[in-house]
Image (cartoon, rainbow, N blue to C red):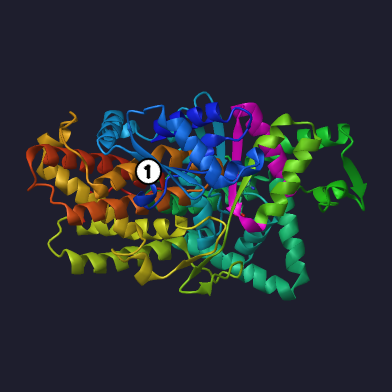
Amino acid sequence: MEQIKELIARKIKLLLPNTDIDIASAIELPADSKLGDLAVPCFKFSKALRKAPPAIAAELKAGLETENFEFIDRIEAVGGYLNFFVRPDYFISILKLILDAGADFGKSNIGVNKVVVIDYSSPNIAKRFHIGHLGTTIIGNSLKKLHSFCGYKCIGINYLGDWGTQFGKVIAAYKLWSSEEKLAERGMDELVDLYVRFTKESEENEELHELAKNEFRKLEQYDEESTSLWKKFKAISLSEYEKTYKLLGIEFDSYNGESFYNDKMQTAIDELKVKNLLELDNGAYIVRLDEFKLPVVLILKSDGSTIYATRDIAAAIWRQNEYKFDKALYVTSAGQSLHFTQVFKVLELMGYEWAGRLVHVPYGTYSIGGEKIASRTGNVVLLDDLFKDAIEHAAAVIENKNPELENKAEVAEAVGVGAVVFNSLLNNRIKDVNFDWEEALSFEGNTGPYVQYTYARTASILRKNESEAEDTDSCDYTPNAEEIALIKCLSDFPNKVIQAINTYEPSVITRFALELCWAFNLFYHNNNILKSEIDCRQFRLQLAKAVNTTLGNTLNLIGLRETEVI
Ligand code: ARG
């Protein structure tokens, strides 16, 4: 469809030489095929041309009809719209293009020779991986896949929260109430309990604050005992997180967390001084952003310690030197928007032209069954538990649906995890997400299981007719309305990929997956693939093949597993 769109846009441009309207992007693909396969809303030109839309539509129709486009059946001017009806057999050639591209269909080269750094997941060590980090983990993963799909070199960074005063607390708590044995036995549970107890007790005990500060200072000075404890806490945390990453099929290219920048901050601070951006304020060093109506950024506290923003400034500079990125994305909850606005502004004031290529990608909050998730207090929903629950729920649904299935455990894992991921990526990322198990795991709704099940259905059709499905020769057949709708939907995939990248929205792909499944299932229910005549059967198998490949890519781009059987 893209080619037709461009051709029509070019021809219209010739008929409207004195406008600078972007015609190609004005062309619509009507959902109702009675309104044509492509439509030009002429009201978009009426201001520039000082004419009523119906008059423009009629003039364009007259001008274009002399063109005799081989793939256009007819053109209609209705109201202010100019509607183009494509010849049904043209869709066969679109399908052929899709099949010829195979697994590459949808890819583009917009990212060739470009580097994108994606900072995502980034949990805070010595704390459990909780639902607050689900969004960043799966949105980041999907953005990484989308960019790779379009040729970008991607660097996925897990910027572990492995530095900060909270480690002073954990070390102090460990020294007060724990031991090597307890830690070895209880691992992460011990660390979490220590932190919670310390936070609680320090509410009433001032001395504990001092103790924690002192411990953190020792850590900052590379005290041997503190460093070795900190390393141990980090290793315990990482091995916990790895389980979740494995479940989600996520791998990072770098685990350079906050601590990695300890020895890189001084240079950034010196640079801020030299560039006259730093101001002494009650013993602390700050950067003022009043001019930009932004709050002050604290760079160095009065006790000489650095903070989150200082590390992010140093990290951005290091990453640009190391990776020479074209774009750097930071995926975090919307709660950190101000932080990133400030950090990006400081880098801009430092004179870095690449500061304009730093992008914060925020997302909303999560709740389960309508209940907001509390954080900080230790009373949080852990990702481990969430996925365990999801897999159990999925196992029950599958047991019910297909008790004979061989690899039930594996499928339950793919479907359970997929249901959570799909549900989280279903709407625009800034919207809040709610999990309702019944809804998320239904095989009939707008869900991961529905998409995975449709994928498995296409896989099964192809398995049963392997040799015929491989045939990509054009066949002598005129597709019906459902088949045309399906091809149209497929042909929109490359656009959707670009749109998802441009808006940093995996939800464009989840919604595309649903549309493709609706179109396929409608076709599948109303048309018998195997009992049809040879040319028609061949065409339908080819169509199933194109859906299988595209849906497989779609699942992959949002981080769901491709399930051959369910
Ligand atoms: N560790 C932080 C948190 O859990 C997220 C880090 C985001 N990335 C960054 N470069 N600041 O809130």
Q: Would you say 84 lies left or right of 433 here?
A: left
| Magenta highlight range | 307-335
Residue 405 location, quadrant: bottom left
Q: Position of residue 434 (x, y in %)?
A: 48, 67
Image position of 151 with respect to 530: above or below: above
**Where is mark 1, residue-wise?**
37
Image position of 332 with respect to 416: above or below: above
Q: What residue lies at 19% left-to-right and 57% top-to-bottom? A: 525
Q: Would you say 566 lies left or right of 40 here?
A: left
Foreground pick, 233 / 282:
282
Q: Position of residue 336 (x, y in %)?
A: 66, 54
Residue 414 location, quadrant: bottom left
Q: Position of residue 175 (x, y in %)?
A: 62, 61
Q: Position of residue 17 (x, y in %)?
A: 60, 27
The kind of residue on which mark 1 rests is Asp
By secondary structure, the bulk of the magenta-drawn segment is best described as: helix
Q: What residue lies at 45% left-to-right and 61% top-to-bottom? A: 383
Q: Would you say 391 lies left or right of 291 here?
A: left
Name of the residue lying farthest toward the top: 113
Image position of 202 with respect to 426: above or below: below
Q: Locate the N terminus by quadrant.
A: top left
Q: Would you say 72 lies left or right of 464 here?
A: right
